[in-house]
Image: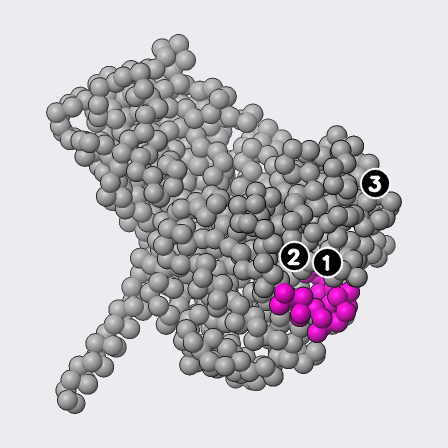
Amino acid sequence: MKVFNILILFLILFACKRENNEPVVNSVDPTIGGVGVLLQPTRPTVHLPNQMIRVYPMKNDQLDDRIRYFPLINASHRTLWIFGLMPWDEAIMPDSWTKPVVFDRETTTPYYYAATLGDNGCRLEFAPEKKSGVFRIDFRGGQPQYLRLTTLNSGGGAFEINGQRTLSGYEEFNGMKAWLYAQTDADITESIYRDESAKDAVMLGFGEKARTVVFRYGISFISEEQAKQNLLKEIPDNNFEKVKQAARQTWDNTLSQIRVEGGAPAQRRVFYTALYRCYERMVDINEYGRYYSNYDHRVHESARPFYVDNWLWDLYLAYEPLHTILNPQFVTDQIRSYVLMYEQGGTIPSFALLTGDWPAMTGNYAAAWFADAWYKGLRDFDLKTAYEGVRKNSLDQTLLPWNNGPRTPLDDFYNEHGYMPGLPPGQPETVPQVDTGWEKRQSVAVTTVNSYADWCIAQLAGELNLAADRELFLNRAAFYRNVFRTGKGFMWPKDSDGNWIEPFDPRFAGREYFTENNAYTFNWDVKHDLNGLFRLMGGREQAEAHLDHLFREGLGKSKWDFWTTQPDATGMVGQFPMGNEPAFHIPYIYNYLGSPWKTQKRIRMLLDAFFTDNLFGIPGDEDGGGMSAFVVFSMMGFFPVTPGIPVYVAGSPVFDKVTIQLPNGKTFTIVAKNNSAGNKYIQSASLNGQPLTKPWFAHTDLAGGGTLEFIMGDSPNKQWGSRPEDAPPSALDFKNR
């Protein structure tokens, strides 16, 4: 019996050692979330962290059994693809240029993709470099063998065969141009164009003898010659395995910056897949000393990265703060890119795409991002110019959703009266700049989100000793109070005469008043002044009751009717939408109300219910890292509720131990003793061996390295973190805290 027990102990220790030594990249499953719950699925993107070349098979979702093509570059997260490639081993017919191909035996990793295509069993593989990529296609003999190349956008383009093994091409889109330079390791025996005059689609023939063809290519936004240089610098030969293994090592090194111990294998897959998705954007388009900017339509000389492809509405809350911990230089370079875009184009972007600013959604969230970085010690950017840009966005540009340009009469009203006026139901729109189709005014959301942005601008003004500006923006930060109806306990729209709009149901208001959600979500949008919000609600006790009610209130109508109005509000728990970004911080607000145990309860439930290791494992649009960053933070056990206030608020750690390797050479470790699925409640905590009685800690505590230890249990400790003085900082001027 003793020998048996020793053997069991040995096997356990061996399993633990194997788990700890297993490359973390093996825990990534890019198919997680590959079937959208109402909205967009995730894509099994193959790329290097934050680099230009991003490739995945174009199909409807992970249940689709056909692939239309492989884009040689995804130039903007799920919205812009350039140059399509597909092996073709059948006779060429009129529909061959667009016909999808069935596939089987798919392999998906961050660094490598493979699938068996078509009835003849052609095997395709892909591996990425920074500005280039390589396909390896194993054709079977006995039938024609082609590579189909097509342009994918309506702007125009063409391909040219430059020799037996070389080709080039270009594609125009959204006012700019991409160039392709490619080489094969087998002779191109024929080239068949769909249209000899246009040459925008071509079949490259390789005969009928069974062979493996390596197709390697470079992409440039500068010139064909630069595309060639990108390829020859990164993939100088046809060694596919070398590219694949280098990409694998890069990913393993990147993901290993966070090491987790304990938890179930499924939880580790969820965690590392989420972490992998946090490296899809922004992407560096500097091509070895030069980059093309569509913000001023020029090529610039620069030794620094130039980053594009950011949806800031989605990413400011969790994604950017995560990288501020893990990759502060990356964040600094992103902000420097934003400042350059302002200098080149005259506006601090909202969604900083490759093609220019896309003024999607609402809010001036660059202000929150800049303030958060600054107060966490990132100083290597031009604060004066960054401030000038976000100030201009607030005072001189329109705040209307999905708009760029100067102020409108609605903006002048906002500046004078302190809220964006709404329209009563059925009243026609009077301002031509408003999107009267789907988006509308979103009047309450515009008021709350810009109140927060203006608070962040006030903090930056203080750093620049601009006292008058600081006072101006602190006053504007309180505008949210003008749309809170105290008698009802909700954010509520007002008309231009200052009257509360009736009829109005907080559950069913759509984009006339809110952005993708309703009053239940935007009640809690005041991240910069939660204490002020609690007072409007009648105090902490009443505010906590409101927060409880959020998670318990029913839809009030059928699901199909509810989602007709609010299709983005997915992952519903009562009226709480786990599948949409404005809600991510809400479960953590219990920490500010003296009930951290309710945060612990909710976070574990939300992670278990909505973030699983299967095709349905993402409850809403993932948006290139926005939702995944929430998962990474929450599984580690803390969250940045208010970017701009450099503190983290406690949740409920999923793993027994998390070790973060910081760029300064130090480590920050979170230990959860007695942790399990049932033991989700914090009993006590310590930071670097000293008792921690408050449910938050400072960024300096983390950045300086150390150990945060939680003792977990199966029942709430309702005293831990419950005193008003334990609450995290949240005030109009946190520096006075």
Q: Position of residue 64 (x, y in %)?
A: 34, 39
User: Which corner quadrant of the image does residue 17 belong to?
Assistant: bottom left
Tag nearer the camera, 3 or 2: 2
Label 1 sits on a secondary structure element that is strand
Closer to us: 445 or 337? 445
Q: Magenta segment, which residues?
A: 525-549
Q: Are marks 1 and 3 in contact (CB under 8 Å)?
A: no
- Of labels 3 and 2, earlier in sequence is 3
Label 2 sits on a secondary structure element that is helix
Amino acid at pointer 3? Asp
Q: Position of residue 603 (x, y in %)?
A: 51, 67
Q: Where is residue 410 in the image (x, y as percent from the top left)?
A: 80, 39
Q: Which mark is residue 520?
A: 2
375 part of magenta stretch: no
Closer to us: 450 or 20? 450
Pointer 1 residue: 490
